[in-house]
Amino acid sequence: MANKTIPQLPEQTGKTDNDLLAIVDSGETTTSKIKVSTLLSGLGSPFIAADGTNNVVPDYYATTAIDSSSSENAIIGGSSNQITTNVNNAAVIGGSTNSITNRFDNAIVAGNGNSNAARYGVVVGGQNNQLQNGSQRGVIVGGINNTLNEGLQSAIIGGNNGDINLTWNSVNIAPFNSGIYHDQSHGQDEGFGLYNAPNSYIRQTAGSGTAAFKGGNASIFNSWTCDIAGQTGNVTKFATIIGSESSQITGGTRGTVLIGCSGRTGLNSHTTYVETLEAFTHVVLNDYSNLNFTSDANAAAGGVPLGGLYHNAGDLKVRIT
């Protein structure tokens, strides 16, 4: 073959381990050959190209750790991690037996046995946590056996056996068998929260099941076995339970709050239930000028509920009839 310059040589677009390159050691006059894999390993890179397009795995992995139908992915460190079919722009960093499936722009960072089938979501640490197909822009941080399914912009942090299903902008912090089940078909009601709430739920039917809840802007704080229950056909919104045991807010109410209550049920809208109230300074009737009645009958006609406070020319009264 006649001498040719490098630009005149035919171009090879593929590469195999048996491809050879010419190499000259510094200070030597002899030209040698070297395999592509030997050259790359000599540079100290811990990664190799995986199956598919622009996928990278640690050099001790078989290329099947990333499926050939996936592209632009990486597995960095860890053991027995995998990226399966039709995944794009995803990464598993460290940990073991973690998997990303069927989606794109997501990640798993450390942990064990975690799975991510979401869009734009991440699982950070923990064990056996799941971002399921249909979840978007969600995150699970730590904990065990937590599941985020069919939700948007939601998070589970720590705890175990926590669920968020069909919700928007929701958070479940340090759950213990606690869950939020919202009826997304009802609309874009949002803003649900469970905060260190063991065995507590925001769901349709109080006491059992995982039926979808209709409503929005509902929260349970530091509670044990509590429910905010929309019930069939009813919408419950702006409901809050704080520091309670075995308490419920029933379906069809709005603006209902339980504070420090045990074994109580919130039945009325725009009502705050308090087990015992202690005032350090004053108890004030803001609308006192319109709460001046001469009798219980007049107070009832004026809208004062049974047990409600009113006054008669400054004398404090409680409506009992």
Image (cartoon, grey):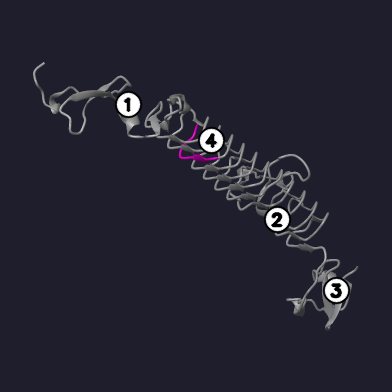
Tell me the number on the disc at residue 298. 3
Q: CA distance from mark 2 to mark 1?
A: 59 Å
Does 203 appear above or below 30?
below
Residue 102 falls inside the magenta stretch: yes
Disc 4 is placed on an element classified as loop
Q: CA distance from mark 1 to mark 3?
A: 96 Å
Does 137 appear above or below 98?
below
Tell me the number on the disc at residue 117. 4
Image quarter of the C terminus: bottom right
Residue at label 2? Answer: 221
* Amino acid type at image mark 2: Phe
> Is residue 12 among what the camera can see?
no
Q: x, y percentage for residue 106?
A: 48, 40
- Mark 4 against mark 1, which lies toward the viewer? 1
Residue furthest to the front? 27
Does 1 appear above or below 179?
above
Does 276 appear above or below 99?
below
Residue at label 1? Answer: 38
Q: Nearer the viewer, residue 33 or 152?
A: 33
Dot placed on the residue nearer the N-terminal end, 2 or 1 = 1
- Mark 1 against mark 3, which lies toward the viewer? 1
